Amino acid sequence: MAKIINGKEVSASVREELKKETAELVEKYGIRPGLAVIIVGDDPASKVYVNNKEKGCAEVGYYSEVYRLPAETTQEELIALVQKLNSDDKIHGILCQLPLPKHLDENEVILAINPDKDVDAFHPVNVGRIMIGDYSFLPCTPAGVMTLIESTGTDISGKECVVIGRSNIVGKPQAMLLLHKNGTVTICHSRTKNLAEVTRRADILVVAIGKADFVTGDMVKEGAVVIDVGMNRRADGKLTGDVDFASVEPKASYITPVPGGVGPMTISMLLRNTMTAAKNTIK
Ligand code: GUN
């Protein structure tokens, strides 16, 4: 029987802490962390995420601006907005919600964001900083995973850590963060041979492959910590992760549910990065 890692609770405690830090920062330095979020077009899922980011800012006392731009926005208009926000002292973090409409170049937009305000940690400068272990911003999803692992009291040092998935925004940075904590890290992906053999070695298993109920009990070592980054919608409309909870839960020592595990953490990590960006401006 695994203990269930409650992402909502851990997320709430991070926000409590940020609320206190905001009050201190305002009182001592007159600085209120400010986040600007840009959304282009009307993708329904993106709209929900952006609304939640705005609410998160209000909850911890940040200043926020949301730019809801029409789908026809041009690359030049978008870049001009990013540049304006780069030189706005009230704004410490800038986030452009992805995906962008097809006619816009996401990479160019990411490159236009001042790396010191890049609270997604998507800019190549920040990606490089993560690689060498000298970073301010942690990419939000892997940072949420690390905070959840830490909440269990598990010491990562020397442990076998297996990450399934090699995306630029989850798998690869996740592997780096585990490595920085002295884990012995293996990255698996769609071409990995004998996947179950590898995953059965894991003391800590992070699954971010995007396939519903992909990891089953026979792929998991007794006592493993299992973190499910997946978010898939079943035919019946229910949300499910990449881990088959019913067969894995009896073998794991700790496991995250979906929903209610990694999901609630990501915006809190974005708020944490925005706090860091604001503190970094103190001379
Ligand atoms: N779209 C889905 N997740 C994210 C995220 O973490 N950051 C941005 N900018 N867009 C997203």
Image (cartoon, helix red, strand yellow):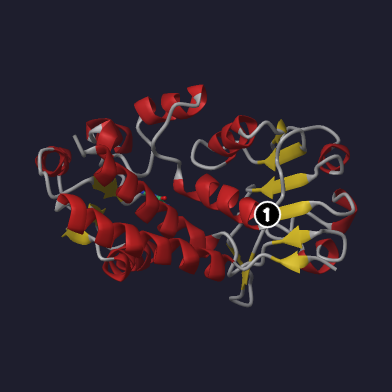
Residue name at image x 32 percent, y 33 percent: 107
| Figure check: 247 above or below 34 | below
Give coordinates of residue 111: x percent, y percent.
Answer: 27, 30
Q: In which quarter of the image is the N terminus?
A: bottom right
- For residue 276, side relative to residue 72 (left or right): right
Front-most of residues 28 and 157:
28
Residue name at image x 17 percent, y 52 percent: 31
- For residue 26, side relative to residue 10 (left or right): left
Give coordinates of residue 49: x percent, y percent.
Answer: 37, 63
Q: Which residue lies furthest to the front in this view?
A: 28
Q: Which residue lies furthest to the bottom in this view?
A: 236
Identified by mark 1, the residue type is: Ile
| Figure check: 239 above or below 14 | below
| Figure check: 35 above or below 234 | above
The residue that label 1 is drawn on is: 227
Tell me if I can see residue 32 in this picture. no
Give coordinates of residue 277: x percent, y percent.
Answer: 29, 42
* Neighbourhood count class around disc 1 (C-alpha, 10 Å): few under 14, some 14–19, many 20 upward: many
- For residue 107, side relative to residue 113 (left or right): right
Give coordinates of residue 129: x percent, y percent.
Answer: 43, 26
Mark 1 residue element: strand
| Figure check: 175 above or below 211 | above
Front-most of residues 39 and 235:
39
Residue name at image x 54 percent, y 35 percent: 173
**Residue 237 lies in quadrant:** bottom right
Residue name at image x 46 percent, y 56 percent: 266
Tell me if I can see residue 22 in this picture. yes
Q: Quadrant of the C terminus?
A: top left
